[in-house]
Image (cartoon, rainbow, N blue to C red):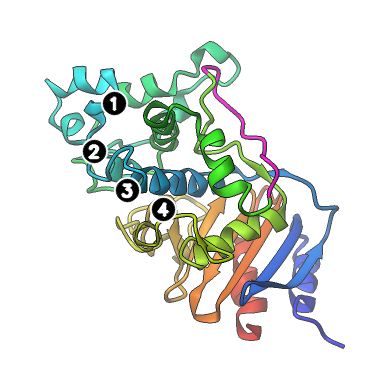
């Protein structure tokens, strides 16, 4: 008897894609799961960003800061630069969330990862020229997400991972996960989170359900609505791997898909959580695909969508 994931599994094998685990949820339940490898916590790379974003949403709901709060309120270097750089003076939390910091390139590309003392990402962020007015141009910027992680610590008194543990992870039945830190002890925010595919799919379900889990509101629904809709255009984002799914706009650390109404969490080497509201479904991939990661995402459209 043919099952939901037969075509997906066959396509993975035919293309020799390095997919590890796939989980499909619909109506809140797991309706399909396939492990090409034994499931274990895996580095989620930039899928981590969406967790950072949701921590920001919770913190805003708790009154720690606002979307329009300026970075000069929290970061001394921003306050110092603001006097001579109007772009820095205008930078807000919203601008960090939507990758609209004003940089022309990601400052983290200049970090020397071989020497821990060079990992001052905050300094790299403020040392990079602010070429564009904040919020006007999308530049994929890991340092912006790092600043959001640091902001959580500055305003709540606990680091990002500890902040999310009682508010999200424990509520979802997820043991406190590993989240890699920078040398100063701040969780990376832009990467570093380790989860299993099944646990990750629970987080996807939480977002699909507008922040509610088992009847309890964990994340403000209004924030999720903003995060999962276009906050900035990505039409100029054109790396070699880009597809139509990279040109539909970006929310708050969430990508929009070409399929109408859908969005995704997106990480290097094929980590994806695809939210399909019109099908009440969440598709989760954990992978180690070094060359054709977008082919992993496209499995959703080519092998699953018409079955949901």
Horizontally, residue 34 falls left or right of residue 144, namely: right
Callout in the foreground (3, 2): 2
Q: Do the residues labelled 2 and 1 touch (CB within 8 Å)?
A: yes
Q: Which residue lies at the image location 46% right of the left edge and 44% below the top edge?
A: 55
What residue is disc 2 on? 69
In the image, residue 6 sits, relative to residue 253, either above or below, namely below
Q: Which residue lies at the image location 38% right of the left edge and 65% below the top edge?
A: 248
What residue is disc 3 on? 138
Say which quarter of the image contains residue 123: top left
Q: Does the magenta stretch include residue 180?
A: yes
Q: Could you tell me which secondary element the residue under label 3 belongs to? A: loop
- Residue 74 has which mark? 1
Q: Quadrant of the C terminus?
A: bottom right
Rendered location of residue 189, percent (x, y): 50, 36
Q: Could you tell me which secondary element the residue under label 1 belongs to? A: loop
Q: How far apart are marks 3 and 2 (CA)?
A: 20 Å
Callout in the foreground (4, 3): 3
Q: Distance between the residues labelled 1 and 4?
A: 33 Å
In the image, residue 68 sits, relative to residue 9, either above or below, namely above
Horizontally, residue 193 falls left or right of residue 132, namely: right
Q: How far apart are marks 2 and 1 (CA)?
A: 9 Å
Rendered location of residue 145, percent (x, y): 42, 38
Query: Which of the two discs, 4 and 2, labels the residue nearer the N terminus?
Result: 2
Rendered location of residue 65, percent (x, y): 29, 38
Say which quarter of the image contains residue 140: top left
Magenta stretch in the rendered image: 174-184
- Residue 238 has which mark? 4
Callout in the foreground (1, 4): 1
Q: How far apart are marks 4 and 2 (CA)?
A: 30 Å
Q: Distance between the residues labelled 4 and 3?
A: 11 Å
Q: Which residue lies at the image location 84% right of the left edge and 54% below the top edge?
A: 37
């Amino acid at each position: 008897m043919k099952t939901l994931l037969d075509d997906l599994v066959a396509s993975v094998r035919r293309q020799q894609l390095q997919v590890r685990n796939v989980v499909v949820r619909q109506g809140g339940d797991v309706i399909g799961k396939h492990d090409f490898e034994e499931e274990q916590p895996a580095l989620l790379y930039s899928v981590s960003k969406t967790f950072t974003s949701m921590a920001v949403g919770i913190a805003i709901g708790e009154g720690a800061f606002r979307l329009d709060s300026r970075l000069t309120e929290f970061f001394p270097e921003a306050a110092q630069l603001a006097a001579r750089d109007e772009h820095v003076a205008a930078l807000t939390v919203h601008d960090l969330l939507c990758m609209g910091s004003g940089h022309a390139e990601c400052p983290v590309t200049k970090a020397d990862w071989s020497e821990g003392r060079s990992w001052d990402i905050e300094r790299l962020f403020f040392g990079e020229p602010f070429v564009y007015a904040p919020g006007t141009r999308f530049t994929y910027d890991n340092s912006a997400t790092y600043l959001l992680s640091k902001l959580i610590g500055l305003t709540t008194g606990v680091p990002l991972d500890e902040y999310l543990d009682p508010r999200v992870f424990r509520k979802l039945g997820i043991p406190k996960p590993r989240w890699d830190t920078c040398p100063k002890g701040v969780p990376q925010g832009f990467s570093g989170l380790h989860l299993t595919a099944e646990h990750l799919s629970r987080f996807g379900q939480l977002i699909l359900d507008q922040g509610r889990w088992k009847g309890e509101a964990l994340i403000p629904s209004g924030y999720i609505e903003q995060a999962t809709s276009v906050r900035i255009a990505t039409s100029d984002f054109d790396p070699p791997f880009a597809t139509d799914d990279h040109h539909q706009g970006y929310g708050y650390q969430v990508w929009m898909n070409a399929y109408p109404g859908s969005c995704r969490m997106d990480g290097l080497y094929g980590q994806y959580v695809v939210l399909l509201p019109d099908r009440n479904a969440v598709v989760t991939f954990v992978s180690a695909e070094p060359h054709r990661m977008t082919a992993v995402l496209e499995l959703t459209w080519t092998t699953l969508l018409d079955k949901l």
